[in-house]
Image: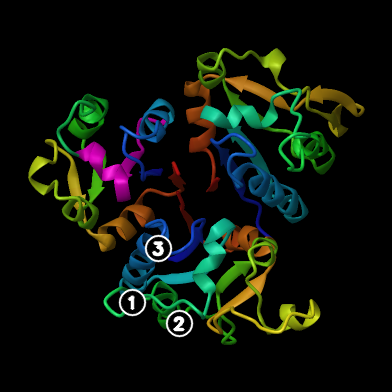
Amino acid sequence: MKISIQINEGPYQHQASDTAYQFAKAAIEKGHEIFRVFFYHDGVNNASRFTMPPQDDRNVVNQWAELDIKDADGNPELVVCIAAALRRGMLDESEASKNGIDGNNVHPAFRISGLGQLIEAGIQSDRLVVFGD
Amino acid sequence: MLHTVNKSSFERNSLQSCINTIDDTSVILLIEDGVISAANNANSSMLTDLASQGRVYALKGDVEARGISSKVANNIKLVDYAGFVDLVVEHGTAVSWV
Amino acid sequence: MATKKFMYLNRKASYGTVYAIESLEVVLIAAAFEQDVSLAFIDDGVYQIIEGQNTDSIGMKNFSKTYHALGDYDINKLYVSAESLEERGLTEDDLMPLVYEDEDDDWAEKPSVKVVSNAELSKIMSDQDVCLSF
């Protein structure tokens, strides 16, 4: 089955991203397809490649990256809402250069895109599951 | 439908709102702090009827993490993450009471 | 593209958290996808469409007027929980008079807001393909 996920909260503050990750991992292990994970609200903070938890803690961002959720063409399907991301200082290379900012922090396993991607995930998937506060 | 509730009934009204609008065939899965409602406590009666119909599940990992494994109320079924996936697959549209 | 029934479940008041405005943003984007869209306002979510919001003193944008635009995007199924209103001492008269023009009825102006019981809401929810919670 094709399953998509919406995550509304950032890492470490809420369990939402951890639960969603365990769910996604279990779904993949059972042979289902995770069509897309959409990060919205503070959920965009799950995409920061600068995330550095202490050594004895899980790295939520790397965990997501290691699930390697991509489309058939190899594009990341860990999608970060552009409006929510820019508000919170989450930029990829292209947004940084477009806005004249001298750095970018979105992990390469993620991509920035619009809210339409969330609606499209709802249309294309058999199920959409929301994780939030 | 599968309704997920992730808040303790002592903290928020999510579980009550879910119960108020649940239809006759849907099931509830308690996750995260929602599992506190799976334990025998002053709010247990909220779920007695649905649990006796076999329609209440709780995420095992969250129950264990919160140290309430021995206090889970009768008829509430524990599932792991794979079981969570099965519930999503089997019960159609998922509604999250975040 | 297939048409699905999308429900947006709103249970939090505006301003205290970001969920109300970001839910509204998704709904407006969703309009372009020509899906069947319903909005449910339950619990404190009913405060999102209360009349007379004024944000002058809190330094935040008053986005309540945007709900009036929903009708223009063919989003005209706004279900409000009767029980949630009553618990909060509110009636339908406290809500913004949101309307749409019905193209099947000579563009007559009709109310978009429907106050429904939890039992009715339960039926409406059971009919949905996708539920986005905010």
Q: Chain of mark 3?
A: A
SS for tag 1?
A: loop
- Counting other residues with Cα less than 10 Å from the Cα at mark 2, is it few (<14), some (14-19), or many (20 or more)? some
**Range of the magenta residues?**
B22-38
Q: Label 3 sits on what residue type?
A: Tyr
Mark-to-mark CA distance, 2 and 3: 21 Å
Locate the C terminus of chain C and report the quarter of the image it occupies.
top right
Q: Say if residue B31 shows up in the picture.
A: no
Q: Earlier in the sequence, mark 2 or mark 3?
A: 3
Residue that mark 2 sits on: A68
In front of the other: B23 or B66? B66
Tell me how many marks there are. 3
Q: Earlier in the sequence, mark 3 or mark 1?
A: 3
Q: Give the number of the mark in front: 1 or 2.
A: 1
SS for tag 2?
A: loop
Residue that mark 1 sits on: A54
Q: Label 2 sits on what residue type?
A: Asp
Q: Give the number of the mark in front: 3 or 1.
A: 1
